[in-house]
Image: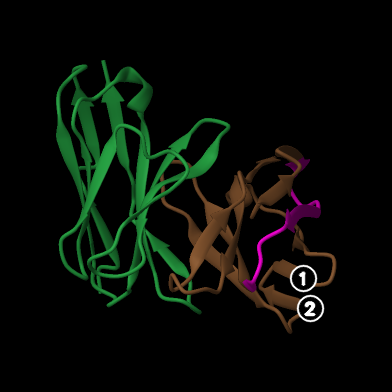
Amino acid sequence: KNQVEQSPQSLIILEGKNCTLQCNYTVSPFSNLRWYKQDTGRGPVSLTIMTFSENTKSNGRYTATLDADTKQSSLHITASQLSDSASYICVVSSQGSTLGRLYFGRGTQLTVWP
Amino acid sequence: NAGVTQTPKFQVLKTGQSMTLQCAQDMNHNSMYWYRQDPGMGLRLIYYSASEGTTDKGEVPNGYNVSRLNKREFSLRLESAAPSQTSVYFCASYRQGTEAFFGQGTRLTVV
């Protein structure tokens, strides 16, 4: 069964600290993995994409890693800011005859305190 | 470039009433999706359409119907609303190899 599991479910950190969010998936055949940020009351917005051949990709203070062998990804946030408070969702896409299918994790709710 | 547009943004229904949520995208994407999001549950797929003229059930399709009117538009219909359908609904569109783009959501309350 194609699944995406995220941990932790929620996380509270102090402003300026770093944190790492985890995503494990069983989706096959794998196409790519994206991390989305969802602010309260808004739709998710893409942060970064990881394809099969990529191990690490950075987008400002966000760094995503992918281990395609173990089917694990992480999102590392450096020097957190209050505006980082949001839900972070791992989304894996599969490649197939249906022109691709998206599988969502339930998200990690990050709260950054001053 | 508007991306994905959902209407309405907010709606209150009485139990048993019907309504249609509208979604349109202007990115020429083949695939479109309807999700519901409930506290602590994440995004759950209701229905999706891989291409114009096709629709498939997702994880939680009961109580909903969809129509892929054309490549741009994908609507979600509640024939007889129930309190359990109180949720935030998101429409998304996607072209394989690119990112999914989401609408701003419809907050639906059924009383």
Amino acid bearing label 2? Asn
At 62% from the left and 49% from the top, the residue drawn is A105
At 44% from the left and 66% from the top, the residue drawn is B100
At 29% from the left and 25% from the top, the residue drawn is B109
Q: Residues within 10 Å of mark 2 (few under 14, many from 20)?
A: few
- A66 to the left or right of B1: right
Q: Quadrant of residue B13?
A: top left
At 43% from the left and 38% from the top, the residue drawn is B60
Which chain is displayed in brown in the rendered image?
A
Closest to the observer: B33 or A59? B33
Contact? badges 2 and 1 (CB < 8 Å)? yes
Disc 2 to disc 1, C-alpha distance: 5 Å
The chain to which mark 2 is attached is: A
The chain to which mark 1 is attached is: A
* Tag 2 and tag 1 share a subunit: yes
For marks 2 and 1 on the same chain, the one whose residue lies earlier in the sequence: 2
The spot of residue A26 in percent (x, y) is 71, 58
Residue positioned most to the bottom: A53
Q: Which residues are magenta?
A: A13-30
Relative to residue B22, is residue A12 depicted above or below? above
Relative to residue B43, is residue A64 depicted above or below? below
Mark identifier at residue A81: none
Q: Circle 2 sits in a helix, a strand or a loop, which is it?
A: loop
- Residue A22 painted magenta: yes
Q: Residues within 10 Å of mark 1 (few under 14, many from 20)?
A: many
Question: Which residue does the numbered mark 2 point to in the structure image?
Answer: A55
Q: Quadrant of residue B33?
A: bottom left
Question: Which residue does the numbered mark 1 point to in the structure image?
Answer: A66
Amino acid bearing label 1? Leu
- Residue A75 painted magenta: no
What colour has chain B? Answer: green
The spot of residue B89 in percent (x, y) is 35, 42
